[in-house]
Image (cartoon, rainbow, N blue to C red):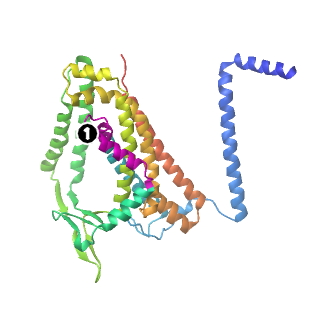
Amino acid sequence: MKIKNFNLGLGGFLGNNPKLSNFLPQAVTLFAIIFIIGFFTFNAQTNMDTRGIEFGFGFLSQESSFDIQFSLVEYDGSHSYARAYLVGLLNTILVSVVGIFFATILGVIVGISRLSPNYLIAKLAEVYVEVFRNIPLLLQIFFWYFAALRALPLPTEAINFFDLSFLTIKGFFIPRLIWTNFPILFYSFVAAIVAIVFIYIHAKRKQEATGERLPVFYISIGLITILPLIAYFLGGVGVSLEVPYLVQQSKTIFNFKGGINIIPELMALALALSLYTATFIAECVRAGIMGVSKGQKEAAASIGLTPGQVLKLVIMPQALRIIIPPTTNQYLNLTKNSSLAAAIAYPDLVLVFSGTALMQTGRAIEIVSITMLTYLSLSIAISIFMNWYNKKIAIKEK
Protein backbone atom coordinates (compact mmCIF):
# COMPACT_ATOMS: atom_id res chain seq x y z
CA MET A 1 0.00 0.00 0.00
CA LYS A 2 2.84 2.37 0.85
CA ILE A 3 4.58 1.62 -2.44
CA LYS A 4 1.36 2.24 -4.32
CA ASN A 5 0.82 5.51 -2.51
CA PHE A 6 4.42 6.49 -3.24
CA ASN A 7 3.94 5.78 -6.96
CA LEU A 8 0.72 7.74 -7.00
CA GLY A 9 2.40 10.57 -5.17
CA LEU A 10 5.37 10.62 -7.55
CA GLY A 11 3.08 10.44 -10.56
CA GLY A 12 0.96 13.24 -9.22
CA PHE A 13 4.03 15.33 -8.44
CA LEU A 14 5.42 14.89 -11.97
CA GLY A 15 1.98 15.47 -13.45
CA ASN A 16 1.76 18.79 -11.66
CA ASN A 17 5.25 19.76 -12.89
CA PRO A 18 5.27 19.35 -16.71
CA LYS A 19 8.71 20.97 -17.07
CA LEU A 20 10.20 18.50 -14.60
CA SER A 21 8.45 15.55 -16.23
CA ASN A 22 9.96 16.54 -19.59
CA PHE A 23 13.41 17.23 -18.16
CA LEU A 24 13.81 14.14 -15.98
CA PRO A 25 13.80 11.47 -18.77
CA GLN A 26 16.29 13.54 -20.76
CA ALA A 27 18.55 13.94 -17.74
CA VAL A 28 18.44 10.21 -17.01
CA THR A 29 19.22 9.40 -20.68
CA LEU A 30 22.12 11.86 -20.74
CA PHE A 31 23.51 10.45 -17.50
CA ALA A 32 23.28 6.90 -18.89
CA ILE A 33 25.14 7.92 -22.08
CA ILE A 34 27.88 9.68 -20.12
CA PHE A 35 28.20 6.68 -17.80
CA ILE A 36 28.51 4.20 -20.69
CA ILE A 37 31.10 6.35 -22.51
CA GLY A 38 33.03 6.88 -19.28
CA PHE A 39 32.98 3.18 -18.46
CA PHE A 40 34.36 2.09 -21.83
CA THR A 41 36.90 4.93 -21.87
CA PHE A 42 38.16 3.99 -18.41
CA ASN A 43 38.25 0.32 -19.34
CA ALA A 44 40.21 1.04 -22.54
CA GLN A 45 42.66 3.30 -20.71
CA THR A 46 43.21 0.66 -18.01
CA ASN A 47 43.92 -2.04 -20.59
CA MET A 48 46.30 0.25 -22.47
CA ASP A 49 48.19 1.10 -19.26
CA THR A 50 48.45 -2.61 -18.41
CA ARG A 51 49.98 -3.36 -21.83
CA GLY A 52 52.18 -0.27 -21.83
CA ILE A 53 50.41 1.29 -24.83
CA GLU A 54 50.60 5.07 -25.05
CA PHE A 55 47.67 7.15 -26.29
CA GLY A 56 48.20 10.34 -28.28
CA PHE A 57 48.13 12.00 -31.67
CA GLY A 58 51.75 13.08 -31.87
CA PHE A 59 52.39 10.46 -34.56
CA LEU A 60 50.45 12.61 -37.05
CA SER A 61 53.47 14.92 -37.39
CA GLN A 62 55.90 12.06 -38.01
CA GLU A 63 57.19 11.15 -41.47
CA SER A 64 54.92 8.62 -43.17
CA SER A 65 57.66 6.92 -45.25
CA PHE A 66 55.25 5.43 -47.79
CA ASP A 67 54.03 6.53 -51.21
CA ILE A 68 50.46 6.83 -52.43
CA GLN A 69 49.53 5.89 -55.99
CA PHE A 70 46.98 8.67 -56.58
CA SER A 71 46.79 12.06 -54.88
CA LEU A 72 44.96 15.32 -55.49
CA VAL A 73 47.61 17.25 -53.54
CA GLU A 74 51.37 17.07 -53.51
CA TYR A 75 52.54 14.06 -51.52
CA ASP A 76 55.53 11.73 -51.13
CA GLY A 77 57.00 9.54 -48.44
CA SER A 78 58.69 12.49 -46.74
CA HIS A 79 55.34 14.03 -45.79
CA SER A 80 53.65 13.43 -42.44
CA TYR A 81 50.86 11.03 -41.50
CA ALA A 82 48.57 14.06 -41.27
CA ARG A 83 49.29 14.73 -44.96
CA ALA A 84 48.60 11.08 -45.77
CA TYR A 85 45.27 11.43 -43.94
CA LEU A 86 44.45 14.47 -46.07
CA VAL A 87 45.26 12.55 -49.27
CA GLY A 88 42.98 9.67 -48.24
CA LEU A 89 40.20 12.07 -47.22
CA LEU A 90 40.32 13.98 -50.52
CA ASN A 91 40.31 10.73 -52.50
CA THR A 92 37.27 9.56 -50.55
CA ILE A 93 35.47 12.85 -51.14
CA LEU A 94 36.37 12.71 -54.85
CA VAL A 95 34.89 9.27 -55.49
CA SER A 96 31.85 10.11 -53.33
CA VAL A 97 31.10 13.33 -55.22
CA VAL A 98 31.61 11.67 -58.62
CA GLY A 99 29.43 8.73 -57.57
CA ILE A 100 26.65 10.95 -56.22
CA PHE A 101 26.68 13.10 -59.36
CA PHE A 102 26.37 10.26 -61.86
CA ALA A 103 24.08 8.15 -59.66
CA THR A 104 21.66 11.07 -59.36
CA ILE A 105 21.55 11.73 -63.11
CA LEU A 106 21.18 8.05 -63.99
CA GLY A 107 18.69 7.44 -61.17
CA VAL A 108 16.40 10.26 -62.26
CA ILE A 109 16.48 9.11 -65.90
CA VAL A 110 15.79 5.47 -65.00
CA GLY A 111 13.11 6.40 -62.45
CA ILE A 112 11.20 8.43 -65.03
CA SER A 113 11.78 5.74 -67.67
CA ARG A 114 10.16 3.11 -65.45
CA LEU A 115 6.91 5.05 -65.75
CA SER A 116 7.24 5.58 -69.50
CA PRO A 117 4.24 4.57 -71.66
CA ASN A 118 6.78 3.03 -74.03
CA TYR A 119 6.83 -0.67 -73.13
CA LEU A 120 10.43 -1.30 -74.24
CA ILE A 121 11.88 1.68 -72.33
CA ALA A 122 9.94 0.82 -69.17
CA LYS A 123 11.03 -2.82 -69.27
CA LEU A 124 14.68 -1.98 -69.95
CA ALA A 125 14.66 0.37 -66.95
CA GLU A 126 13.04 -2.32 -64.80
CA VAL A 127 15.61 -4.93 -65.84
CA TYR A 128 18.47 -2.54 -65.07
CA VAL A 129 17.09 -1.84 -61.58
CA GLU A 130 16.43 -5.47 -60.73
CA VAL A 131 19.82 -6.67 -61.98
CA PHE A 132 22.15 -4.06 -60.50
CA ARG A 133 20.49 -3.62 -57.12
CA ASN A 134 20.42 -7.37 -56.45
CA ILE A 135 24.11 -8.02 -57.12
CA PRO A 136 26.34 -7.24 -54.11
CA LEU A 137 28.26 -4.01 -54.54
CA LEU A 138 31.63 -5.63 -53.81
CA LEU A 139 31.10 -8.12 -56.65
CA GLN A 140 30.25 -5.26 -59.02
CA ILE A 141 33.46 -3.48 -58.03
CA PHE A 142 35.42 -6.67 -58.72
CA PHE A 143 33.68 -7.08 -62.07
CA TRP A 144 34.52 -3.60 -63.33
CA TYR A 145 38.07 -3.73 -62.05
CA PHE A 146 39.20 -7.29 -62.80
CA ALA A 147 36.92 -8.28 -65.70
CA ALA A 148 36.27 -5.03 -67.58
CA LEU A 149 39.17 -2.64 -67.02
CA ARG A 150 41.88 -5.31 -66.77
CA ALA A 151 40.92 -6.38 -70.28
CA LEU A 152 41.98 -3.03 -71.72
CA PRO A 153 45.08 -2.90 -73.94
CA LEU A 154 48.63 -2.01 -72.92
CA PRO A 155 49.84 1.60 -73.43
CA THR A 156 51.51 0.68 -76.73
CA GLU A 157 48.12 -0.43 -78.08
CA ALA A 158 46.00 2.19 -76.31
CA ILE A 159 42.51 3.08 -77.48
CA ASN A 160 43.05 6.47 -79.11
CA PHE A 161 40.49 9.28 -78.91
CA PHE A 162 41.47 11.89 -81.55
CA ASP A 163 45.13 11.80 -80.42
CA LEU A 164 44.06 13.65 -77.25
CA SER A 165 42.97 10.93 -74.82
CA PHE A 166 44.13 7.35 -74.41
CA LEU A 167 42.42 4.46 -72.64
CA THR A 168 44.74 1.71 -71.40
CA ILE A 169 45.04 -0.91 -68.69
CA LYS A 170 46.97 1.69 -66.66
CA GLY A 171 44.22 4.29 -66.76
CA PHE A 172 42.43 6.86 -68.86
CA PHE A 173 44.87 9.59 -69.88
CA ILE A 174 43.23 12.92 -70.75
CA PRO A 175 44.65 16.38 -71.57
CA ARG A 176 45.42 18.86 -68.80
CA LEU A 177 44.56 22.55 -69.09
CA ILE A 178 47.42 24.83 -68.05
CA TRP A 179 46.20 28.33 -67.21
CA THR A 180 47.84 31.72 -66.84
CA ASN A 181 46.08 34.44 -64.80
CA PHE A 182 43.55 31.81 -63.76
CA PRO A 183 42.27 33.78 -60.70
CA ILE A 184 40.70 36.36 -63.04
CA LEU A 185 38.73 33.62 -64.81
CA PHE A 186 37.77 32.04 -61.48
CA TYR A 187 36.44 35.32 -60.09
CA SER A 188 34.38 35.82 -63.24
CA PHE A 189 32.76 32.41 -62.68
CA VAL A 190 32.03 33.34 -59.07
CA ALA A 191 30.51 36.66 -60.17
CA ALA A 192 28.34 34.84 -62.72
CA ILE A 193 27.10 32.35 -60.12
CA VAL A 194 26.28 35.14 -57.64
CA ALA A 195 24.39 37.02 -60.36
CA ILE A 196 22.45 33.86 -61.27
CA VAL A 197 21.42 33.36 -57.63
CA PHE A 198 20.09 36.92 -57.38
CA ILE A 199 18.27 36.61 -60.71
CA TYR A 200 16.72 33.31 -59.60
CA ILE A 201 15.47 34.86 -56.34
CA HIS A 202 14.05 37.87 -58.20
CA ALA A 203 12.39 35.65 -60.83
CA LYS A 204 10.81 33.45 -58.16
CA ARG A 205 9.38 36.44 -56.29
CA LYS A 206 8.07 37.96 -59.50
CA GLN A 207 6.40 34.70 -60.50
CA GLU A 208 4.75 34.39 -57.08
CA ALA A 209 3.53 38.00 -57.28
CA THR A 210 2.45 38.26 -60.93
CA GLY A 211 2.54 34.74 -62.37
CA GLU A 212 5.05 35.86 -65.02
CA ARG A 213 7.98 33.49 -65.58
CA LEU A 214 11.37 34.91 -66.54
CA PRO A 215 13.71 32.85 -68.80
CA VAL A 216 16.10 32.17 -65.92
CA PHE A 217 17.71 29.17 -67.63
CA TYR A 218 18.74 31.08 -70.75
CA ILE A 219 19.87 34.08 -68.71
CA SER A 220 22.00 31.77 -66.57
CA ILE A 221 23.58 30.14 -69.62
CA GLY A 222 24.37 33.57 -71.00
CA LEU A 223 25.97 34.80 -67.77
CA ILE A 224 28.02 31.67 -67.15
CA THR A 225 29.31 31.93 -70.74
CA ILE A 226 29.69 35.65 -71.39
CA LEU A 227 31.35 36.79 -68.14
CA PRO A 228 34.21 34.22 -68.35
CA LEU A 229 34.68 35.03 -72.05
CA ILE A 230 35.02 38.72 -71.22
CA ALA A 231 37.51 37.87 -68.47
CA TYR A 232 39.41 35.60 -70.86
CA PHE A 233 39.85 38.19 -73.62
CA LEU A 234 40.25 41.32 -71.49
CA GLY A 235 42.00 39.90 -68.44
CA GLY A 236 44.99 38.40 -70.20
CA VAL A 237 43.96 34.84 -69.37
CA GLY A 238 45.87 32.22 -71.30
CA VAL A 239 45.41 28.48 -71.64
CA SER A 240 47.43 25.69 -73.19
CA LEU A 241 46.74 21.99 -73.55
CA GLU A 242 49.12 19.38 -72.17
CA VAL A 243 48.40 16.24 -74.17
CA PRO A 244 49.56 12.84 -72.83
CA TYR A 245 52.34 11.21 -74.83
CA LEU A 246 53.88 7.73 -74.81
CA VAL A 247 57.33 7.27 -73.26
CA GLN A 248 59.56 4.24 -72.82
CA GLN A 249 60.32 3.81 -69.10
CA SER A 250 62.52 0.76 -69.55
CA LYS A 251 63.40 -1.79 -72.20
CA THR A 252 59.95 -3.41 -72.14
CA ILE A 253 57.80 -0.97 -70.17
CA PHE A 254 55.89 1.88 -71.83
CA ASN A 255 53.47 4.36 -70.32
CA PHE A 256 51.93 7.75 -70.99
CA LYS A 257 53.34 10.91 -69.47
CA GLY A 258 51.72 14.32 -69.04
CA GLY A 259 48.04 15.18 -68.88
CA ILE A 260 45.78 13.68 -66.22
CA ASN A 261 45.59 9.98 -65.46
CA ILE A 262 42.26 8.67 -64.17
CA ILE A 263 43.49 5.44 -62.59
CA PRO A 264 41.57 2.17 -63.16
CA GLU A 265 40.78 1.85 -59.45
CA LEU A 266 38.94 5.18 -59.49
CA MET A 267 37.04 4.33 -62.66
CA ALA A 268 35.96 0.90 -61.38
CA LEU A 269 34.87 2.24 -58.00
CA ALA A 270 33.00 5.22 -59.46
CA LEU A 271 31.25 3.00 -62.02
CA ALA A 272 30.16 0.43 -59.46
CA LEU A 273 28.99 2.99 -56.89
CA SER A 274 27.09 5.00 -59.52
CA LEU A 275 25.36 2.06 -61.19
CA TYR A 276 24.47 0.40 -57.89
CA THR A 277 23.19 3.49 -56.06
CA ALA A 278 21.31 4.76 -59.14
CA THR A 279 18.94 1.79 -58.89
CA PHE A 280 17.78 2.86 -55.43
CA ILE A 281 17.53 6.52 -56.44
CA ALA A 282 15.45 5.43 -59.45
CA GLU A 283 12.97 3.74 -57.12
CA CYS A 284 12.85 6.89 -54.96
CA VAL A 285 12.07 8.97 -58.07
CA ARG A 286 9.44 6.52 -59.26
CA ALA A 287 7.75 6.52 -55.85
CA GLY A 288 7.80 10.30 -55.71
CA ILE A 289 6.19 10.69 -59.13
CA MET A 290 3.56 8.07 -58.34
CA GLY A 291 2.79 9.95 -55.13
CA VAL A 292 1.49 12.94 -57.10
CA SER A 293 -2.24 12.80 -57.73
CA LYS A 294 -3.22 11.67 -61.21
CA GLY A 295 -5.83 14.40 -61.29
CA GLN A 296 -3.15 17.09 -61.17
CA LYS A 297 -1.43 15.58 -64.20
CA GLU A 298 -4.71 15.50 -66.10
CA ALA A 299 -5.55 19.07 -65.06
CA ALA A 300 -2.15 20.32 -66.21
CA ALA A 301 -2.55 18.53 -69.56
CA SER A 302 -6.05 19.97 -69.98
CA ILE A 303 -4.74 23.56 -69.97
CA GLY A 304 -2.37 22.81 -72.82
CA LEU A 305 0.89 21.92 -71.07
CA THR A 306 3.13 19.51 -72.92
CA PRO A 307 4.21 16.26 -71.18
CA GLY A 308 7.63 17.80 -70.55
CA GLN A 309 6.08 20.91 -68.99
CA VAL A 310 3.75 18.80 -66.87
CA LEU A 311 6.73 16.84 -65.54
CA LYS A 312 8.87 19.93 -64.93
CA LEU A 313 6.27 22.39 -63.58
CA VAL A 314 3.66 20.22 -61.89
CA ILE A 315 4.90 16.73 -61.07
CA MET A 316 8.54 17.14 -60.03
CA PRO A 317 8.07 20.13 -57.66
CA GLN A 318 5.58 18.05 -55.69
CA ALA A 319 7.41 14.76 -56.07
CA LEU A 320 10.65 16.19 -54.68
CA ARG A 321 9.27 16.32 -51.14
CA ILE A 322 8.85 12.53 -51.36
CA ILE A 323 12.06 11.88 -53.28
CA ILE A 324 14.62 13.84 -51.25
CA PRO A 325 14.47 12.10 -47.80
CA PRO A 326 15.12 8.54 -49.10
CA THR A 327 17.59 9.87 -51.67
CA THR A 328 19.56 11.46 -48.83
CA ASN A 329 19.91 7.99 -47.33
CA GLN A 330 21.31 6.73 -50.63
CA TYR A 331 23.88 9.54 -50.70
CA LEU A 332 24.96 8.54 -47.20
CA ASN A 333 25.14 4.88 -48.20
CA LEU A 334 27.26 5.70 -51.25
CA THR A 335 29.71 7.76 -49.18
CA LYS A 336 30.12 4.96 -46.64
CA ASN A 337 30.23 2.27 -49.32
CA SER A 338 33.22 4.04 -50.84
CA SER A 339 35.25 2.41 -48.05
CA LEU A 340 35.07 -0.79 -50.13
CA ALA A 341 37.76 0.87 -52.26
CA ALA A 342 40.37 -0.95 -50.19
CA ALA A 343 39.33 -4.19 -51.95
CA ILE A 344 40.88 -2.96 -55.22
CA ALA A 345 43.64 -0.81 -53.65
CA TYR A 346 42.11 2.57 -54.42
CA PRO A 347 43.89 4.91 -51.96
CA ASP A 348 40.91 6.17 -50.01
CA LEU A 349 40.82 7.04 -46.31
CA VAL A 350 40.40 3.44 -45.16
CA LEU A 351 43.28 2.03 -47.22
CA VAL A 352 45.73 4.89 -46.65
CA PHE A 353 45.01 5.78 -43.04
CA SER A 354 43.26 2.80 -41.41
CA GLY A 355 45.39 0.43 -43.45
CA THR A 356 48.96 1.47 -44.19
CA ALA A 357 49.31 4.16 -41.51
CA LEU A 358 47.80 1.92 -38.82
CA MET A 359 50.11 -0.99 -39.63
CA GLN A 360 53.18 1.24 -39.55
CA THR A 361 52.36 3.11 -36.33
CA GLY A 362 50.30 0.58 -34.38
CA ARG A 363 48.02 3.42 -33.22
CA ALA A 364 44.83 1.45 -33.69
CA ILE A 365 42.56 3.34 -31.28
CA GLU A 366 43.61 6.78 -32.46
CA ILE A 367 43.49 5.99 -36.19
CA VAL A 368 40.22 4.06 -36.08
CA SER A 369 38.65 6.83 -33.98
CA ILE A 370 39.76 9.51 -36.44
CA THR A 371 38.46 7.47 -39.38
CA MET A 372 35.09 6.88 -37.72
CA LEU A 373 34.73 10.56 -36.82
CA THR A 374 35.63 11.53 -40.38
CA TYR A 375 32.91 9.37 -41.93
CA LEU A 376 30.48 10.59 -39.28
CA SER A 377 31.33 14.21 -40.14
CA LEU A 378 30.91 13.59 -43.88
CA SER A 379 27.54 11.95 -43.29
CA ILE A 380 26.33 14.76 -41.03
CA ALA A 381 27.46 17.37 -43.58
CA ILE A 382 25.49 15.61 -46.35
CA SER A 383 22.44 15.30 -44.10
CA ILE A 384 22.54 18.99 -43.11
CA PHE A 385 22.81 20.11 -46.75
CA MET A 386 20.02 17.80 -47.96
CA ASN A 387 17.73 18.78 -45.08
CA TRP A 388 18.34 22.44 -45.90
CA TYR A 389 17.60 21.79 -49.58
CA ASN A 390 14.47 19.82 -48.71
CA LYS A 391 13.22 22.68 -46.56
CA LYS A 392 14.14 25.20 -49.26
CA ILE A 393 12.13 23.56 -52.03
CA ALA A 394 9.18 22.60 -49.83
CA ILE A 395 5.84 23.87 -51.09
CA LYS A 396 4.68 26.62 -48.75
CA GLU A 397 1.03 27.50 -48.41
CA LYS A 398 0.16 31.17 -48.14
| Residue at the farthest front position | 119
In the rendered view of the protein, which quadrant contains the N terminus? Answer: top right
Q: Amino acid at mark 1?
A: Ile
Q: Is residue 83 left or right of residue 45?
A: left
User: Which image quarter: residue 361?
Assistant: bottom right
| Residue at the farthest right position | 1
**In this rendering, is residue 200 above or below 126?**
above
**In this rendering, is residue 166 above or below 1?**
below
Q: Secondary structure at mark 1?
A: helix
The percent coordinates of residue 385 (x first, y second) are: 41, 38
Q: Is residue 113 magenta?
A: yes
Q: Which residue is mark 1?
A: 193
Q: Is residue 157 magenta?
A: no
The percent coordinates of residue 22 (x first, y second) are: 65, 24
Q: Is residue 25 visible?
A: yes
Name the residue located 84 percent from the left edge and 23 percent from the top edge. 3
Task: Return the residue nearer the eye: 229 or 309.
Answer: 309
Q: Is residue 394 left or right of residue 350?
A: left
Q: Which span of residues is magenta-colored?
A: 108-137
